[in-house]
Amino acid sequence: MNNTILLTKEEVKKEEVKKQDAKFEVTEKVTKKGWFEYESSYDGVLLNIDTEGARLLGFTSPDDVIGKKINELYAHPNDHEKTLSMLVRDGKVNGFFTLMKGRDDKLFYIKQDSKIIVDDHYYNLPSKVQSSFEFSQSI
């Protein structure tokens, strides 16, 4: 009888492991990523964005977002200032969580990795910022 109970417990553990693996796979498949580029000024104008990035921000296509000012997409202007100061200091930002404001003022967190792209022709001055981001959580 103890063997039956032990086998049942082992089977239950195996099922739990399978469920955890299944949850991990679902989470992995649901993870959404995008990227964008904007001018390196404080209110930098969005120059380019991929389709998934535009959708994550709540827009239907990249054309709806290109030309907008990047600081309008941050929920808190201080977050954008922090990102810019880190970019100026280090040339890149890795794993920075930011509260963003999408279309219709919908709030959500992203995890972003950004870097400054310099213009080789003009004394290595920053010309644009390139960011990749991952949707983290909706509020």
Image (cartoon, rainbow, N blue to C red):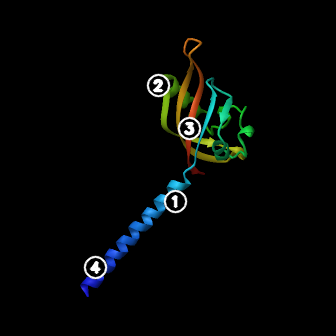
For label 2, the SS is helix
Q: Mark 2 — residue?
A: 90
Lateral position of residue 44 relative to residue 10, left or right: right
Nearest to the observer: residue 83 or residue 12: 12
Q: CA gap, disc 4 to disc 2?
A: 56 Å
| Residue 108 percent location from the top left of the image | 60, 47
Upstream in the sequence, badge 2 or badge 1? 1
Residue under the image location 46 percent in, 25 percent down: 90
Residue 66 position by quadrant? top right
For label 1, the SS is helix
User: In front: mark 2 or mark 1?
Assistant: 1
Q: Mark 1 — residue?
A: 26
Residue 6: mark in rendering:
4
Q: Mark 3 — residue?
A: 132
| Residue 112 percent location from the top left of the image | 53, 38
Q: How packed is label 2: few (under 14 Cα within 10 Å), some, or many (20 or more)? A: few
Upstream in the sequence, badge 2 or badge 3? 2
Residue 17 position by quadrant? bottom left
Residue type at the position of mark 1: Val
Residue type at the position of mark 3: Ser
Nearest to the observer: residue 65 or residue 97: 65
Q: CA gap, disc 2 to disc 1?
A: 35 Å
